[in-house]
Amino acid sequence: MRSRQGEKALNILMLAAENGALPGGKVGGIGDVIRDAPGALAALEHSVTVLTPGYGHFSRLPGATRIDTLQTVFRGQRERVSLHRVPSRTGTAGVSCLALEHPLFSSAGPARIYVDDDPGRPFATDGSRFALFCAAAAAAITDGVIPRPDIIHLHDWHSALFALLLHTDPVYAAIADIPLVYTIHNLALQGIRPLSGDESALFSWFPSLPHLPPSAIDPRYRDCYNPMRAAIALCGRVHAVSPQYAEEICDPDSDFGCGLQADLRNARHEGRLVGILNGCDYPDVAPPPATFADTLALARRDVRRWIGRTAEAHSSHVLALHQLDLWLAGRQPRPQALLTSVGRLTDQKLGLLCSVMPDGRLCLEHALDALGDDGLCVMLGSGDPTLEMTLTRLASERDNLLFLCGYSDALADALYAAGDLFLMPSTFEPCGISQMLAMREGQPCLVNAVGGLVDTVQDGETGFVFAADADVGAEQALLMRLGEALDCLRGQPDAYRRIRAGAAAERFPWGRAALAYGEMLYRPLLPASPESQ
């Protein structure tokens, strides 16, 4: 079969921890990519199978069916793992969703994709779960339970061990020649575990593993195994999710490579490191944007729902509900300047805004001063408990900050459409999806000049970009550019409308990314066809 480009259509197998095409299958950006990229590849006539752990959840979804059972050796004994076909919410032709099921995958509770372990044993629970997942996936392909693909595409550290097994364990020799592609979604999370001495250690999982290549050893902790480093060395192509990020992670003078700069520079030198920007979906018919009052009402409904989930109400929810009730009862008009922020509360996303300035106040406090009494900043997200409490405290002190400590797709979509300026001052950003979603709705973004933000936002044309330099730190640069953006919004409406229109017109289609996958990641690894010889 030929693809639309006249080349052989490929059978692609993707291994990932998340799949946003399944109910409950998305935690972060990986889920978005695994939901959307396969469909774009299928539109080019490729066949894509997505394989994830079942987490005691996917295999029980309506319409899920068990299609086979396989055995794999893990921790020195044979384990039975079942394989299930799961209908996706997208229903895209050419895309199949499979889930492997075993009690270990739901050991922390059903439907729980990631587990936060004690700081003394990071990745212990997830390391074991994803190690079994990789072994079971390799066994399924070796035994023919899953048809042999042309390409196996691994995503982040959760599936990185698969590459090590194929290159070192003779049990999988029959499939060791299948080309491997490895996508880095977040270098900050590498899944590092001890080589031995712990039940969640490489040689505890695979005591008979014959040998280890040097690339499997973490460069900083010589008694530890680093799955991400091994995959970077062993896969035929290494994919960073934006061109700018692919450059940044190789820089020996930056921290973007998270200790793996030398390995990434080597991959680039060998022509294996490729930067391809993630995509965004653009519906044919956009839903009508909600009014400001409707957005507040939607927020109130979600906050009440979050309160009802726990025995004790979180202070952030009580405060937000009180603020929303006051605004709705008073029929407050739309603020003259509405700033929005949507995303996980992490140091990566909020580190700059929550930095302490020379006067002892947070950068965000200065930003709220610039916003003024006629503006409102709405921040949606949850995550780091310290950051949650910081935002809760500020929201209790400032009438122009509304902190919504949770997440819902509907509320996020409403904020993307409602805002005047979207805040995304990440300290690093492999690609980012929130800025694309805000731009799609015509909301310009204020972003740091890093990673995928550089590749998607044009300063003064589709948004506002700030950058630190030798004279101005990142926090001060952020505040200066924010002030300029607010001045443009309030004092230059024609110029701001032009920037809004530029943001709304920008396109980052998944179809373009899928073409690049084929040309830059997949086909260079395939044996030459007879026609090309």
Image: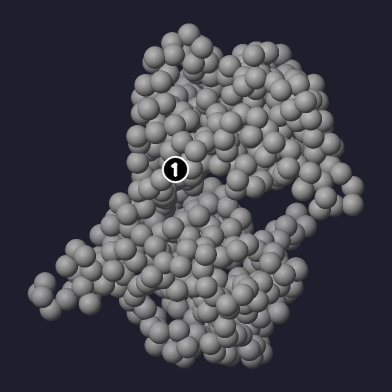
Q: Residue at x 47, y 63 (%)?
A: 90
- Above or below 213: residue 326: above
Q: Residues within 10 Å of mark 1 (few under 14, many from 20)?
A: few
- The quarter of the rendered structure image containing the C terminus is bottom left
- Above or below 324: residue 230: below
Q: Nearer the viewer, residue 165 or 334?
A: 334
Q: From the image, tell me which residue sits under label 1.
A: 286
- The quarter of the rendered structure image containing the N terminus is bottom left
Q: Residue at x 43, y 38 (%)?
A: 440
Residue 142 can be seen, yes or no: yes
Q: Which image quarter: residue 173?
A: bottom left
Q: Residue at x 73, y 42 (%)?
A: 301
Residue 205 can be seen, yes or no: no
The secondary element bearing badge 1 is classed as loop
Residue 77 rendering spot, x and y as whole percentages: 66, 90
Q: Residue at x 58, y 31 (%)?
A: 291
Q: Nearer the viewer, residue 184 or 42?
A: 42
Q: Count the marks.
A: 1
Q: Would residue 418 be found to the left or right of residue 299 on screen? A: left
Residue 345 rendering spot, x and y as whole percentages: 66, 41
Residue 94 rendering spot, x and y as whole percentages: 37, 72
Q: What kind of residue is marked 1?
A: Ala
